[in-house]
């Protein structure tokens, strides 16, 4: 379906033309004076110079040709030359009815679906997930769903950090603690045990212990680096240990993501890209794309138009070790071979921006990805505490993700039990759903690139611009619709008729914007636009609800129209929160 603004634009274009002006002047926008009108066109002002005529006179000429308009109820020329527009009530109702009749609510499917990979999450194996991973998961999940909603083929890839120094550290620490294990016996030729020699909680204790010890002890650090190197060279025992580490850690990571309603199509990691590296490097050298700089292999990625210094992309250190960028380039080869993506979106902390500039340029320059492949970095800002500093536990430590979620859920559970609307069992489930909406909406309602303050009290409030407020609004609609059905009404086959009140008209107008909002959010990869929209929509509904007797209205045509409006509004809200990555309960 066309966007509502496109219908209006078409009529204005025609009116400009009939009045003897250039039709391209007919640009329509949402009104910035909602008290006066719903849409506006400033084309008369823009054309004043070319036509050497007062803008107001042009506006008057145009408006004359809008009298017969099928979608506008009012078109008024106001000084100095604005054209103020109000939608026709019947047209608006009809637009909504067409949305309601379409299972995609009027959102057109991409005509040429793209293959899009969203690289997000980026957890590091054997290290606990902490709040730093929260944004990557929440934003990435929503970006993936948004692309999918538009009809593209989308794969979410977790891109595990499973190949670095942390592996060498863990192996070294295990060896120190249990030197007798067969993994460390160089003469051992048998099969290694199926069972890992550690549990997840031991693993989580081992990593920080080893990491801290290595910082203080040079020889230990050397050993860990050597173990990393041996693992990467294919040491049998270390490879077996590595598998245990990955398996146990990934099982735990999956549990955490499940709690967040985040799931990945691909569980690939840095390790999967390693086998592409030798050939890739050979290719760079043969084609003269990389050169040696003080023993290290680098690719120049400077461009003439750069306003700041972009250092070369490091491919290989002088000791032969590959780096973060090397792995990302090799991963691109793998993705190109397996999926030939049209677009890859990286949802990663914005402090890694330089890394991605280098990788993207190196990938294009060396031809690893096609010219037309779009590589997009969606960098997010830091999640801060109320003190404005990066979010910490009360004790000042790094907050583990599961503890943060548990804290929010407890807060929600408390509220749920106080309200006594649901019994204890339901309260558990419901508080998790609302808790998730609090966390996700709190994050997504901010522009991704900006830092934001994680404020538990504000995010969990049922009032204001919060996830729980949105859910509360949806639950209110569900409850009205249930009661309506309880009174014998049915929800299907109902049609909206022209609005009878300002609040009804305002709600209808908001509802009509759905496809435009989704298209804009996708074009800019901006989930916060969806949040802003559903907040406006929820507010418009609540105003309508407070001013209208929906259920006590005589069961006539008007009531049916109200119910039809509720049905479509609920569908829009549910579609939007689905893209944001959370759901609404039945009651709260
Ligand atoms: N594991 C990385 C980190 O914790 C994030 C990975 C981001 N994705 C990528 N393709 N480099 O910083």
Image: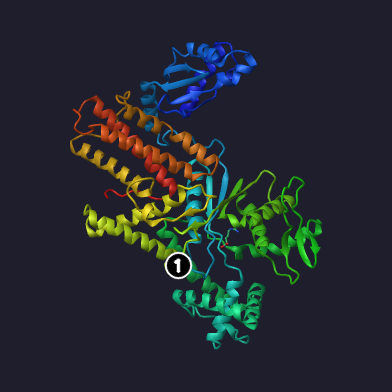
Instruction: Please indicate, yes or no, whether residue 283 appears anywhere in the rendered image.
Output: no
**Figure quadrant, ligand 1:** bottom right
Label 1: how many Cα within 10 Å (few below 14, some 14–19, many 20+): some
Asked if residue 173 is positioned above or below residue 334 in the image, the reply reads below
In the current view of this chain or complex, which residue is farthest to the bottom? 180
Which residue does the image show at 49% across and 14% down from the upper left? 63
The picture places residue 134, in percent across and down from the top left corner, at: 48, 58
Q: Quadrant of residue 211?
A: bottom right
Q: Secondary structure at mark 1?
A: helix
Asked if residue 322 is positioned above or below residue 239 in the image, the reply reads above
Which residue does the image show at 48% across and 45% down from the upper left? 527
Residue 159 versus residue 432: which sits nearer the camera?
432
Q: How many marks?
A: 1
Residue at disc 1, CB closer than 8 Å to ligand 1: no
Q: Which residue is mark 1?
A: 252
Residue 147 versus residue 549: which sits nearer the camera?
549
- Asked whether, in this view, residue 36 is left or right of residue 390, the answer is left
The picture places residue 30, in percent across and down from the top left corner, at: 47, 29
- Asked whether, in this view, residue 554 is left or right of residue 572, the answer is left
Instruction: Please indicate, yes or no, whether residue 442 appears anywhere in the rendered image.
Output: yes
- Asked whether, in this view, residue 339 is left or right of residue 244, the answer is right
The picture places residue 404, in percent across and down from the top left corner, at: 41, 62
Give the image's coloring scheme.
rainbow
Which residue does the image show at 44% across and 46% down from the upper left? 579
Which residue does the image show at 31% across and 35% down from the upper left? 543
The picture places residue 117, in percent across and down from the top left corner, at: 56, 50
Asked if residue 14 is positioned above or below residue 571 in the image, the reply reads above
- Asked whether, in this view, residue 433 is left or right of residue 225, the answer is left
């Amino acid at each position: 379906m066309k966007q509502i603004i496109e219908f209006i634009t078409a009529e204005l274009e025609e009116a400009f033309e009939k009045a003897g002006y250039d039709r391209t002047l007919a640009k329509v926008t949402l009104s910035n004076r909602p008290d006066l009108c719903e849409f506006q066109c400033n084309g008369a002002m823009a054309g004043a110079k070319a036509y050497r005529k007062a803008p107001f006179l042009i506006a008057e000429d145009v408006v004359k040709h809008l009298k017969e308009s099928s979608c506008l109820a009012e078109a008024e020329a106001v000084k100095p030359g604005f054209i103020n527009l109000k939608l026709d009530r019947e047209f608006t109702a009809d637009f909504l009815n067409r949305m309601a009749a379409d299972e995609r609510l009027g959102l057109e499917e991409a005509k040429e679906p793209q293959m899009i990979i969203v690289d997000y999450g980026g957890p590091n194996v054997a290290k606990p997930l902490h709040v730093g991973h929260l944004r990557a998961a929440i934003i990435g999940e929503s970006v993936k769903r948004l692309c999918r909603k538009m009809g593209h083929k989308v794969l979410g890839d977790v891109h595990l950090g499973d190949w670095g120094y942390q592996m060498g550290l863990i192996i070294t620490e295990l060896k120190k603690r249990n030197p007798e294990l067969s993994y460390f016996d160089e003469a051992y030729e048998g099969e290694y045990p199926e069972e890992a020699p550690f549990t997840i909680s031991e693993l989580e204790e081992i990593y920080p212990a080893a990491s801290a010890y290595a910082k203080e002890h040079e020889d230990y650090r050397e050993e860990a680096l050597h173990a990393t190197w041996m693992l990467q060279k294919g040491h049998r025992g270390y490879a077996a240990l590595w598998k245990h580490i990955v398996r146990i850690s990934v099982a735990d990571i999956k549990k955490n993501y499940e709690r967040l309603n985040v799931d990945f199509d691909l569980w690939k990691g840095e390790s999967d890209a390693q086998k592409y590296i030798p050939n890739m490097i050979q290719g760079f050298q043969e084609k003269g794309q990389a050169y040696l700089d003080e023993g290290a292999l680098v690719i120049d990625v400077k461009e003439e138009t750069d306003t700041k210094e972009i250092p070369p992309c490091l491919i290989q250190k002088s000791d032969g070790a590959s780096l973060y960028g090397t792995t990302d380039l090799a991963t691109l080869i793998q993705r190109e071979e397996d999926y030939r993506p049209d677009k890859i979106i990286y949802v990663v902390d914005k402090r890694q921006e330089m890394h991605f500039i280098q990788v993207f340029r190196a990938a294009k320059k060396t031809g690893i990805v096609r010219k037309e492949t779009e590589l997009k970095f969606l960098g997010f800002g830091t999640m801060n505490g109320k003190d404005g500093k990066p979010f910490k536990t009360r004790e000042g430590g790094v907050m583990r993700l599961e503890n943060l979620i548990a804290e929010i859920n407890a807060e929600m559970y408390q509220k749920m039990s106080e309200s006594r609307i649901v019994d204890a069992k339901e309260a558990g489930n419901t508080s998790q759903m609302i808790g998730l909406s609090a966390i996700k909406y709190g994050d997504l309602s901010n522009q991704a690139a900006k830092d934001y303050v994680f404020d538990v009290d504000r995010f969990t409030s049922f009032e204001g611009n919060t996830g729980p407020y949105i859910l509360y609004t949806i639950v209110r609609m569900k409850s009205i619709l249930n009661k309506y059905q309880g009174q014998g009404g049915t929800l299907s086959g109902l049609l909206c008729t022209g609005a009878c009140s300002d609040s009804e008209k305002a709600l209808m107008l908001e509802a009509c914007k759905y496809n435009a909002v989704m298209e804009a959010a996708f074009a800019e990869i901006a989930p916060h636009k969806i949040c802003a929209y559903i907040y406006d929509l929820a507010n418009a509904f609540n105003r309508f609800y407070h001013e209208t007797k929906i259920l006590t209205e005589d069961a006539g045509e008007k009531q049916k129209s109200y119910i039809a409006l509720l049905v479509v509004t609920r569908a829009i809200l549910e579609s939007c929160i689905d893209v944001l990555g959370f759901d609404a309960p039945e009651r709260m």
